[in-house]
Image (tube, rainbow, N blue to C red):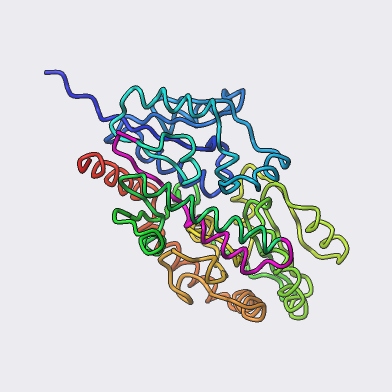
Amino acid sequence: MTQSPRPRLLFVSPRFLFPMDQGGKIRTANTLKGMKGGAFEIVLASPAPADTAPFAADIASVCDRFLSWPEQPPSSVRRVAALASRLPVAAATDRSTAGRACVDAALAERPDVVVVDFPHAGVLVPERLDTPSVLFTHNVEAEIFQRHAARATGLWKLVWADQSRKMARFEGEVLRRFDTVIAVSDRDAQALRTRYGLTSVAAIDTGVDLDFFVCNPPAPPPPKNGGTLVFIATMSWAANVEGIHFLLDKVWPILLRARPAIRAVVIGRNPPDSLSAKIRERGLNVTLTGFVEDIRPHVAESDVYVIPLWVGSGTRIKAFEAMAMGRPVVSTTLGIEGLDVTDREHFLRADSAEEFAAAILTLLDDADLRTTVAGNARSLMEERFSWTVVARQFEAICLETMRRR
């Protein structure tokens, strides 16, 4: 007897997943990698660069078949023009005639379930889907814009408020089109139910690659007047830039009084000139690396991992990567939002400049506390948060959606 083929899952992404240099790419690619060879035959559809040969092994690791259309990163001019659209900028700039044709052709092959990555990718699929459908949302998108608007001033406050209204309308309309919505935390799942009246929202955990982010031995005690901080994020995102300005403007002067030789390494692509100029003009011992192929050596050489964020949604994968590597984390409440970790046990919480500086100095001064916090966090990662576990959660939700429809 011939064995029945596995059901086919069509996964539509608005971004080429490689290199995995952003939180959304990391989460999606690792989830698909964990599902590969499991219950579904996976067909991935996304934009792609002209030459995908350097990424052939990466692509093969996440899907059984890859469909694509030409990648066209939106220019600044296109983003500004999109401000006038009824759609939020993220959705307006993801519209693609070639992308829609590619997805339509894939849907014509009648997959058993379709998963769309991020609400703004809703512009790439028909308004009505006859196939069992799942929307994978990594954030409460409208919440991000609301938080930006609350902190902005002048013209930017008006821009963020306008985008917030557009995203709230668009996000609600898109999410209601799908049979199931998958959120990245219980907190986000409840927020989506409350905000949009959704009845079928499931949550998955945030994962970390424990084989890749191996636990490093505790760093040697920092010199009495120094120590190394590290922050890793996409530096073209406004919230990350704001966080580093906060660190340099409000926290750094306090740190310098206690430890004049303290230094920081900020890793992430496209750091703005405003940061470079500030560091240079003030003579700060802060390094902006730009994009790096491997963040692990930088994390391993650090004493404290910092997350000075005030705007965002979803969960910060980088926090778990630092914890997996055995480095103690200092974070704002929002920076650790949605992650099931405990203050003073797995990280130190700090929501003002004074608290942030005090938490950093406490960890630098107390080797036992650094070791305990880092060890507790690594143990938690091993117990609960591997990508294999997350992939099984995601797969089960897709199977249930297919059966229910």
Q: Is residue 45 above or below residue 82?
A: above
Residue 154 lies, with reference to residue 325, above or below; the image says: below
* Residue, far top: 1
Is residue 173 shown left or right of residue 266? left
Residue that appears at 76% across and 71% down: 249
Q: Nearer the viewer, residue 178 or 207?
A: 178
**Residue at image coords 23%, 24%:** 5
Image height check: is 390 above or below 263?
above
Q: In the shown orientation, is residue 164 left or right of residue 75?
A: left
Relative image position of residue 18 (x, y in whole percent): 55, 36
Query: Magenta residues, as a range?
Result: 129-155
Residue, x 74% and y 80% (percent of image)? 258
- Judging depth in this view, the residue of 287 and 46 nearest the camera is 46
Q: If the image is split into quadrants, where does the C terminus sit?
A: top left
Residue 165 is situated, as x and y percent measured from the top left of the image, at: 55, 58
Kindly identify the residue that appears in the image at 64 percent across and 61 percent down.
302
- Between residues 19 and 298, which one lies in front from this camera angle? 19
Query: In what quadrant of the picture does the N terminus appear?
Result: top left
In the image, 121: left or right of 287?
A: left
Q: Residue furthest left?
A: 1
Toward which corner of the image does residue 4 lie, by quadrant? top left
Judge whether residue 312 is colored magenta: no
Where is residue 195? Give x, y as percent.
41, 62
**Residue 280: horizontal and vertical position, in percent?**
86, 60
Number of numbered labels in the structure image = 0
Q: Residue furthest right?
A: 281
Q: Is residue 280 left or right of residue 192?
A: right
Q: Is residue 131 magenta?
A: yes
